[in-house]
Amino acid sequence: MASQDWFEKDFYAILGVPQDADAATIKKTYRRLARTMHPDHNVGDTAAEDRFKEIGEAYAVLSDPEQRREYDAIRAMSHGGARFTAGGPGGAGAGFEDIFSAFGGAGGPGGQRVRFGTGGAPPNLDDILGQMFGGAGPGAGPGAAGGFGGYGAPAGPRPGADVQASTSIGFRDAVEGSTVTLSSPDLGRINVRIPAGVKDGQRIRLRGKGRRGDPGAPAGDLILTVSVDKHPVFGREGDNLTLDLPVTFAEAALGATVAVPTLDGGSVKVKVAPGTPSGRVLRLKGRGVKRGDHTGDLLAKVQVVVPQRLTDEAREAVERMAAAEDGHDPRAELFERARS
């Protein structure tokens, strides 16, 4: 459910994207801002920390299609879709009138006029939105229906609202699992265990970690969106880890046993067969991402390194090899297939 402060916050402006921005643009912009404003990169900078929380809140709403739809409707209301008038003789109370006809009431002549009385207290946005999006107001009795097409709900203790949050973690933490600490003015500090093998953009639902409900009602959930930083060496394909493995021309031509780095900081030996070309993938079993009872592999793609400079001796050796291969055209088959 929407927050009371959605009226004041322009999440599009916070992320610096247009209102019609697609999901890919919003995600790309958020990740760039999150890396820049991350507290780990701005130690002691409270302004950067507040900005990081602000863009996280904006992304949590705009990345969720349902929340974004509600937010856009609320923002449209705040720019002229609703009229605020005094309620009762002498202006003793305040109410919302002529809420969007799209939500069930028409404000023009002949349409249904709906009034949310407050009895002198400030209007409660959550109650109004409950009416707009299908729930009954707090004053409805058992079996009562709201004024929008009869989509009411029996009164009773209301469960707590879900809370959207986001965090960024390192590549190794995502593979091996980690614990992060989240903090907010409403929920305080929460320690969250990130399971091993979490993927970039994955959402984790933490039951009962959201806002408190009414007495006797359950708390909402905390829905955490995880962004995973890139690694300078390793990539990921499902549960497999990937890397490019440089080998010399001699190692590729003659064969060799070479060391391959692993994510845990160690290494493992792999055999390069004689005549191995660039692009061939060597599979190291069980060296990938472990999730439950399954462990992926490490896929090492061979990249034959061509020397930029040759000694006189090395040049003579290459020239002798070229002379020995005189008459062999490695592109002949390519041209033959191209003509077919």
Image (cartoon, helix red, strand yellow):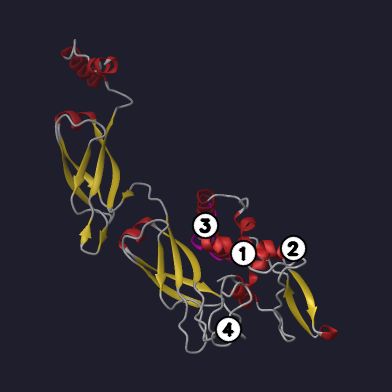
Decide which of 53, 114 is in the foreground and name it.
Answer: 114
Residue corresponding to mark 1: 47
Assign a secondary structure to mark 1: helix
Q: Residues within 10 Å of mark 3 (few under 14, many from 20)?
A: many
Give the residue type at disc 2. Answer: Gly
Q: Position of residue 189 (x, y in %)?
A: 48, 76
Q: Residues within 10 Å of mark 1 (few under 14, many from 20)?
A: few
Residue 15 counted in the magenta span: no
Q: Quadrant of residue 129?
A: bottom right
Q: Upstream in the sequence, badge 2 or badge 3?
A: 3
**Region rendered in magenta:** 32-46
Instruction: Give the CA separation, mark 4 to mark 2.
Output: 30 Å
Label 2 and label 1: CA atoms lie apart by: 33 Å
- Name the one closer to the observer, 267 or 197: 197
Provide the secondary structure element on which disc 2 rests: helix
Question: Residue sitting at 46 percent across and 72 percent down?
Answer: 222
Q: Secondary structure at mark 4?
A: loop
> Which numbered marker is on residue 80?
2
Q: CA distance from mark 1 to mark 4?
A: 48 Å
Label drawn at residue 144: 4
Sequence order check, earlier mark of 3 and 1: 3
The label number, if any, that marks residue 34 in the structure image: 3
